[in-house]
Image (cartoon, rainbow, N blue to C red):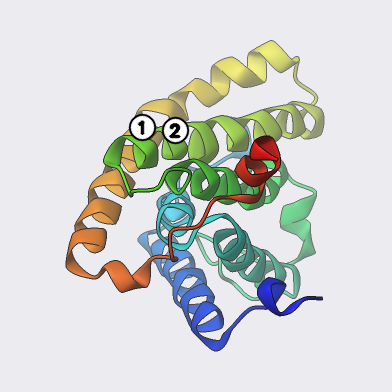
């Protein structure tokens, strides 16, 4: 592992803060949703992690939450935890948080300057699109539903998730204006570097 690929102390602290934020948003409690998948505020934390931390640290923050869940700590909305959640209808959504947060970070931090519209696009593409792309098929498989039926059932989440994407955008922009040092230094993302080579 090279020096540039290691997590620095500052990175570890920020990862811990956002893992704690995602967990704290679970205290709001779940709202029962269709076919066993609740509506929670935790995806707002996933979107914010990507928007603020960038792709690598955001994915690491979400991974911390997933690991804590796997070892049985009640860190998910409603006090859920343990390996059982990874074989239930929410499994795909939970695992989708990791690439979802990374995609939010990749898009939000793609340009030379921090821009609200990139945060908004990242929150919608990564925080909604990527998570649904993983969550809906797993939900269909676990529940024994046709994929189309699971997709229709999941549409109930969309208005709330769009509100969370808007809230993540507003909060990230406000934080960037108030405390820009919380954000990573402006460097090109790996995918963009490869495209430019």
For the residue pair 140 and 64, the one nearer the viewer reads as: 64
Residue under circle 2? 124
* CB atoms of marks 2 and 1 within 8 Å: yes
Q: Is residue 36 above or below residue 72?
A: above
C-alpha gap between disc 2 and disc 1: 7 Å
Helix, strand or loop at label 2? It is: helix
For the residue pair 39 and 20, the one nearer the viewer reads as: 20
Place of residue 26 in the rendered image (x, y in percent of width and height, measured from the top left): 45, 62
Q: Nearer the viewer, mark 2 or mark 1?
A: 2
Return the residue found at the far top. Answer: 148
Q: Residue at x 61, y 34 (%)?
A: 130
For the residue pair 101 and 75, the one nearer the viewer reads as: 101
Please tell me which of labels 2 and 1 falls first in the chain: 2
For the residue pair 3 and 135, the one nearer the viewer reads as: 3
Residue 136 found in image quarter: top right
Place of residue 134 in the rendered image (x, y in percent of width and height, measured from the top left): 70, 35
Q: Residue at x 43, y 45 (%)?
A: 108
Return the residue found at the far front. Answer: 197
**Quadrant placement of the N terminus:** bottom right
Mark identifier at residue 162: 1
């Amino acid at each position: 592992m090279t020096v540039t690929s290691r997590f620095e102390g500052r990175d570890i602290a920020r990862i811990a803060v956002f893992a704690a934020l995602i967990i704290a948003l679970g205290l709001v409690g779940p709202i029962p949703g269709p076919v066993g998948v609740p509506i929670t505020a935790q995806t707002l934390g996933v979107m914010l992690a990507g928007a603020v931390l960038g792709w690598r640290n955001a994915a690491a923050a979400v991974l911390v939450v997933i690991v804590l869940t796997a070892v049985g700590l009640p860190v998910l909305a409603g006090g859920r935890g343990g390996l059982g959640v990874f074989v239930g209808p929410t499994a795909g959504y939970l695992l989708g948080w990791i690439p979802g947060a990374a995609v939010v970070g990749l898009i939000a931090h793609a340009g030379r300057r921090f821009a609200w519209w990139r945060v908004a696009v990242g929150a919608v593409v990564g925080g909604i699109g990527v998570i649904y792309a993983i969550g809906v098929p797993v939900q269909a498989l676990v529940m024994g539903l046709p994929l189309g039926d699971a997709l229709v059932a999941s549409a109930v989440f969309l208005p709330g998730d769009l509100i969370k994407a808007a809230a993540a955008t507003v909060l990230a922009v406000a934080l960037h204006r108030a405390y820009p040092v919380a954000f990573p230094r402006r460097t090109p993302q790996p995918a963009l570097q490869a495209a430019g080579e």
